[in-house]
Image (tube, rainbow, N blue to C red):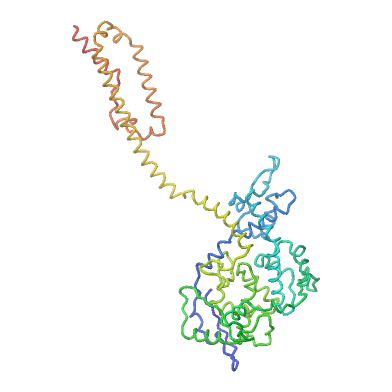
Amino acid sequence: MKSIFRTISIRRHSGHRTFSDTAVEDVYKFVRDRGLDHAVEREKNLRPLLSIKDLIRSEPAKSVPISVITTKKDSLRVPLRPIEFIRSFPSVFQEFLPGGIGIHPHISLTPEILNLDADEQLVYGSESYKQGLADRLLKLLMINRINKIPLEILDLLKWDLGLPQDYVETMVPEFPDYFRVIKSKLRGCSGELELVCWSNDHAVSVLEKKARTIGKGEYKKESAIAFPMKFSNGFVVDKKMKKWIDDWQKLPYISPYENALHLSATSDESDKWAAAVLHEIMNLFVSKKVEKDAILHLGEFMGLRSRFKRVLHNHPGIFYLSSKLRTHTVVLRDGYKRGMLIESNELVTSRNRYMKLMNTVKKENKAVPSSSKREDKEKVEGAVCDTNAKAENDKVEGEVCDTDAKAENDDISGSDVENDHQGDFVDDDEDDDEVDQNQSLNRGRRNSSPRAGRRSFGNSGSRDKPQSRRNKISLKTEKKRSRMY
């Protein structure tokens, strides 16, 4: 994004000054907010994962072939190859071959994800959640000047509004005094959700409620209400911009439930009313954020698309535009604090449990060392093995020396017996050959161990081989013969 403000050349109306007229292009640069970007990015794979989960759960067999998920990849919003995406979350999906001879693998759900799904369905079925959802839908219909919205647009906002998959059949009939579904005269529209009865109690915005609470009942209609503003770290507000913001905040606040389309689209009064409408709609979403294309699609139906775009570009202190996940997401700044949602609800808590299960799998995958870390680990293990091999060599050599010393003592103490049986040491050549073969076999077995390659005495020329016991005994025998003769 080159600049958060756009210069509009042809709008110089007497008595109607706009900030876009006074702003200089390319002066105010877009500054990222890491906390809000993280709030958007942390739900990267949650939406497609739950879409696949709902598809599997709707099947009678509670499993679907991978080919079905592949054909519906775009509607399910799967960012990767479906099989790669599914295998990335083994704690959520199970892969199997039906009958053991299937060509295409089938996908089912794990017991852990089924338990979370059961809790989610309890949330959708609770009276408190259904009442809150009905109030939000009622407010949305009242904000729209024609008091009805096509079902296709609601489907685009289903995730953000927290609507269940079958809300038309299950939830809408439970509130006949709020709204109803009617046939639409629009081409390509299956139906519309229409307002049944206006409610003055619900026609109060979030900012008006706060103003009444702070003013202790002294708030009057169309009084000046200031929007809460917070800029990203590093965003510079110069004197000219600060003066315009202060003057803009002092303008009368027009309720979003009132029709102010008669105001000039280029005036600051209309700009503040459009900001109030967008601010109230954003407060109706469970996570206080929505994709830019979806909210502009709603604005187009309401006749406010251009005003919404102007508000998003001119008021970065109220609405933040995140470019994560290969799209633009509108985030309500005062709905978050340090990147965390301030006001939560049952559905947000349920979604956080799903993400916790997903993130557990990611942490386990990250625990596997990468190629560079694996090489470093092997180097460390090699050094440890060399140290162990050296220690083992010293131990083996010590044992050989101890054995030789013991054998020498035995030879000296048993000289009389050896004098009586001289032929046992001289003529037994076959036995000596067998001893040589056994010793060579034992050395071969010892060198074939995993640490044998690191032993220095296993390589010729690196260290003198330890003298065998047989050679020592033969030398002693020769000395004894010489003394005898």
Considering only vertical position in the picture, is 214 above or below 380? below
Residue found 46% across the figure and 49% down from its top:
371
Q: Position of residue 160 (x, y in %)?
A: 65, 67
Q: Which residue appears farthest toward the bottom when viewing the image?
A: 14
Percent position (x, y) of residue 325?
Answer: 57, 64
Q: Residue placed farthest to the front in the image?
A: 216
User: Residue 254 appears at what percent x and percent y?
Assistant: 64, 84
Q: For the point 29% across and 31% down, which residue is it? A: 461
Side of 98 where 339 appears, left or right: left
The quadrant of the image that shows the C terminus is: top left
Q: How many marks?
A: 0
Residue 171 versus residue 465 in the image, above or below: below
Q: Quadrant of residue 124?
A: bottom right
What residue is drawn where x is 55% and y is 61%?
42
Q: Residue at x 50, y 70 (%)?
A: 33
In the picture, measured across the screen, residue 435 lies left or right of residue 249, that is left
Residue 27 sits above or below residue 115 on the image: below
Judge by depth and name the residue closer to the eye, 412 or 370. Answer: 412
Place of residue 417 in the rendered image (x, y in percent of width and height, measured from the top left)? 27, 8
